[in-house]
Image (spheres, rainbow, N blue to C red):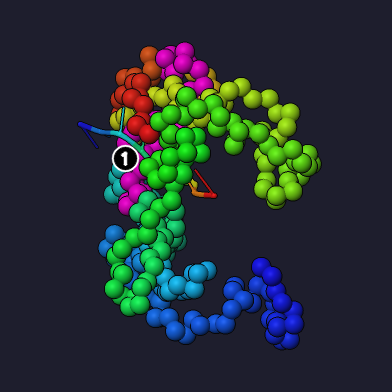
Amino acid sequence: MAVDMARAPQSKLRWGELDEDDGEDLDFLLPPKIVEGPDENGVKRVIEYRFNEDGNKVKVTTTTRVRKLARARLSRRAIERRSWAKFGDAAHEDTGSRLTMVSTEEIILERPRAPGSQAEEVKVAGDPLAAMGKAGAVLMVCRACGKKGDHWTSKCPYKDLAPQVDAFIDKPPTETTASSGATKGGAYVPPSLRAGAERSGTEMRRRNDENSVRVTNLSEDTREPDLLELFRAFGPVSRVYVAVDQKTGMSRGFGFVNFVNKEDAERAINKLNGYGYDNLILRVEWATPRPN
DNA sequence: AATGAGCGG
């Protein structure tokens, strides 16, 4: 942002407090910001108006999902222990006076990138309310095949036939500064993409969804670290994932483990399918690849 | 019983 020092206020305003645009501040012409929710699903909506760079009045709706952390739940065994007769010091104390309590405090997390969250801009013609609900077009131009509008580069149906993608992603700018990764253009180039870094074809950069093993019948408190712990014995694991209900934060009882080597995945399946874990019998099978 | 999230120029 260019700051015209001649026009900038002489006051103690620091640059971060200066108005983003250099034009006059017409914000008073805009309707006030509206905050709705969160509703019972934890969805919060903020509606505000601003002028975009073309000077058009624009309505910006941002929805975020706000979620209550599931309150700590007591395990079955803990519940059972509660019915035990008190002994020791506790037998003489008033209940709760010196005992550890489960906090009832609710912690709210805003997760702007959560599923269901989005920010959309709607151009407002004249009456702002007239354009409510109409979304602007998304602009997608595939770098692999050049088609506009229907897919991203990573999903290009022709990506396997289009090695010229390399022209865009594989060649780092020549004026790369080795130490910082900064270029003349200012874009950061990660070490893996800098000149001299060895690379083998296109598959280097694709996410490894190979050797994916699906694990079902997980107990509800099995987390990713637990899965890793269990499966890493068979060989290097590239990813573990436990499906979680985004609304409740509870495990959905299944997950995926990706192995670097297919043979390891196979051995894990053979050994762990039917394996008793946390009172449940695991099902461990090849995962059907996710449609992408 | 059950097949994942996220990243976009």
Q: Viewer-proximal residue, A122 or A252?
A: A122
Mark 1 belongs to chain: A
Quadrant into which the N terminus of chain A falls:
bottom right
Residue A261 placement, left or right of A91: right
How far across and down, in percent of the image, does residue A290 sit? 36, 31
Residue shown at 47%/24% (left/top)? A161
Q: Amino acid at mark 1?
A: Arg
How far across and down, in percent of the image, does residue A65 sit? 37, 59
- Circle 1 — which element? strand
Residue A227 in the magenta stretch? The answer is no
Residue shown at 34%/60% (left/top)? A135
> In the figure, residue A197 lies in which quadrant?
top right
Residue A157 placement, left or right of B3: right
Residue shown at 44%/21% (left/top)? A211
Magenta-highlighted residues:
A239-268
Number of numbered discs on residues:
1
Q: Viewer-proximal residue, A18 or A266?
A: A18
Q: Is residue A124 visible?
A: yes
Q: Viewer-proximal residue, B2 or A82?
A: B2
How far across and down, in percent of the image, does residue A288 sit? 33, 25
Q: Is residue A271 visible?
A: no
Q: Viewer-proximal residue, A196 or A222?
A: A196
Q: Is residue A251 above or below residue A90?
A: above
Residue A209 placement, left or right of A170: left
Mark 1 surroundings within 10 Å by alpha-carbon count, few (fewer than 14), some (14 through 19), many (20 or more): some
> In the figure, residue A151 lies in which quadrant?
top left
Quadrant into which the C terminus of chain A falls:
top left
Q: Is residue A288 above or below residue A48?
A: above
How far across and down, in percent of the image, does residue A102 sit? 40, 57
Q: Which residue is mark 1?
A: A252
Q: Is residue A67 above or below residue A1?
A: above
